[in-house]
Image: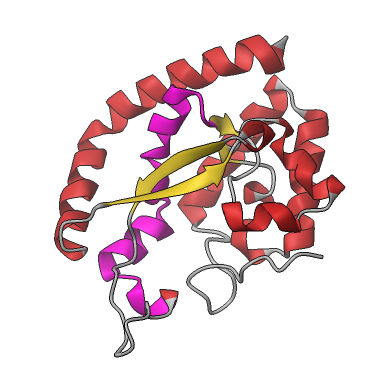
Amino acid sequence: MYKSIIKPFFDFFSALIGLIILSPVFLLVTVFLFVANEGKPFFFQLRPGKNGKIFKIVKFKTMNDRKDNEGKLLPDSKRLTKVGAFVRKTSLDEIPQLLNVLKGDMSLVGPRPLLTDYMHLYNDFQSRRHEVNPGISGWAQVNGRNAISWDKKFEYDVWYVDNISFILDLKILFKTILKVIKSDGITASNEATIEPFQGT
């Protein structure tokens, strides 16, 4: 009952209230990133949701689009702006995803939606992360986030799918707040983002 009825209801109204409360921050970050990213404050990308259904995720854009002499994007670490680094460190880049939660594409808590490029690389066990809606935060995020291995991420994601409950979601939300305050596990060691998943 929680998984199919209470959780979607809780997600919708929590996201709505969150957007209202955070609207001043939302507008302020939008303005700063608009300037830093030359008119592009938001980042849109296709991601797989529940049952592999593709949706368009929205986040604050923390990296610019600067390219090298050959027209290729520079490495992530070189495109991460100062404003973007602050937004990412404080996890403010996740705020726009509350819009995805309102639409029903995401939940507040669930496995993080990864790139569509990874879908064909999953084994049967890893694919089970798509049995529920992806989340803004999840069990893997509060247990290491980008600082843990891909194998451990998938292990945590599937464990969440098998153990989903209201108490567990509250625990994850509480631990998420603590992680954000501590800026813990935001990036892998010496990297702007974690290394791409190569399959197993």
Q: Position of residue 150 (x, y in %)?
A: 73, 62
Q: Is residue 170 above or below residue 177?
A: above
92 drawn magenta: yes
84 drawn magenta: yes
Residue 104 horizontal side relative to residue 51, left or right: left
Image point (79%, 49%), residue name: 126
Q: Quadrant of residue 121?
A: bottom right
Whether residue 144 can be seen here = no
Furthest residue toward bottom: 69
Image point (14%, 60%), residue name: 35
* Secondary structure, magenta segment, majority class: helix
Image point (40%, 54%), residue name: 90
Q: Is residue 170 above or below residue 191?
A: above
Question: What range of the chain is rendered magenta?
Answer: 77-106
Quadrant location, the C terminus: bottom right
**188 and 116: which is toward the camera:** 116
Q: Quadrant of residue 153?
A: bottom right
Image point (76%, 64%), residue name: 199
